[in-house]
Amino acid sequence: MPLRLEEALASLAGSSGLGKEFAVECILIDDGSVPEISLPIHAFEENTDIHFEHIQIGHGGKSAALNEGLQLAKGEYITFLDADDILPAESLSKRLKIAQETNADMVIGGFETFDESGMLNYRKAPDKSSEELIHSLLYAIKSPIHLNSMLIKRSLLAEVGAFDEQLLRGQDKDYAIRLLKHTDNIQVIDQSVYRYRRYSRGWGRQLANRLTTMRCKGRIINKHTKGFQWFICQGWGWSIEVLKLFYEMIFGVYKK
C-alpha cells in the first residue's frame, strides 16, 4: 500500500471518535490511478468501528470516482478525503456534533496546507452567507474554503447532483459553489478539520497543471456568472492564473 494512502486511512480511522452508536462507512474508490495498488482494508477494520468498502472502477478521472462514491454512499452525512491527505483527530465527530445540534445542511471547518517540511498555512473557515462564500470562491486569490473540509447532508447532495466530469481540475470549487447555491443553512467551526498536502513538481508538470486549471476555471466561471459579472470574473480569473504561472516559473510551486 502506498504510504500516503495508508496515512490517509489511518487518519480516518483515528478521526471519528463516534463510538459504536454511529455507523460510519468509508467507500474507497480505486480508479487505477496508482498501478498495482494493494489495499489490506481489514487491517484498519480490526482497529476501528468504521466499515471500509473497496470499489474498483476504470480510470475516468477524479470527478467520475467521486460520482461513483456518491452513488454508493448510504450515510445521512457525507464528507470527502483524497488519498494523500489527512484528517486531524476527531475531525468527523466535531463536525457531526454541530450538524446534529443545529440541523445544518453543511458544517464547514478550517483547513491546513502542508508538505514534507510541515504545516504551510492554516485557513480559517469564513463565517459568511452562501452568497458571500460563492463570491469569495470566484474572486479570491486563495480559496477560502475546501470542499473536503465540509460535512454535508446527503439530501443536499442529492439536490445538487453529480460532479462535472468535464472538469479535470477545480471540480471541488465548482461543486462547493453548487452546494452553496442550494442552501444558506450553514454552520462554521473555527478549527482545522482537514490537512491538504502540497507537492513540489517539475517545471513541465507545473506548466501543464496551470494551463489545465486556467481552462477549467473558465468553464466554472461560465457556469456560475453572466453579464457584466462574467466579464469581470473572467478578466480577474485569467489575470490571477497568469500571475501564478509566472510565479511558479520563477520561484516554484505556490504552496500556501
Image (cartoon, grey):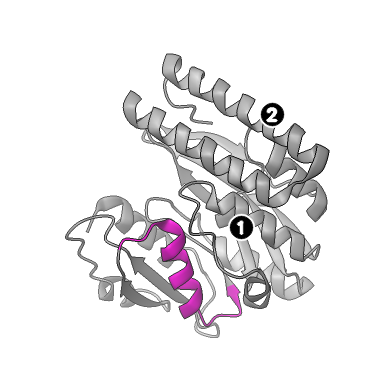
Identity of the residue drawn at 34% across and 32% down: 205
Indicate the quadrant where residue 38 lies. bottom left
Q: Is residue 34 magenta?
A: no
| Residue bounds of the magenta highlight | 59-77
Label 2 neighbourhood size at 10 Å, few (<14), some (14-19), many (20+)? few
In the picture provided, is 192 more to the left or to the right than 98? left
Distance between the alpha carbons at the discs numbered 2 and 1: 22 Å
Type of amino acid at the residue the image marks with label 1:
Tyr
Most extreme residue toward the top is 250
Proximity of marks 2 and 1: CB atoms separated by less than 8 Å = no
Can you say which quadrant of the picture contains the N terminus? bottom left
- In the depicted structure, whether residue 107 falls above or below residue 138: below
Q: Give residue 194's position: percent from left, percent from top.
A: 53, 52
- In the depicted structure, whether residue 220 falls above or below residue 97: above
Q: Give residue 163's position: percent from left, percent from top.
A: 54, 62
Q: Earlier in the sequence, mark 2 or mark 1?
A: 1
Determine which residue is flagged by label 2: 235
SS class of the residue under badge 1? helix
Identity of the residue drawn at 25% across and 55% down: 34
For this rendering, which residue is in front, 181 or 184?
181
Most extreme residue toward the bottom is 21
Most extreme residue toward the left is 36
The circle on residue 175 is 1
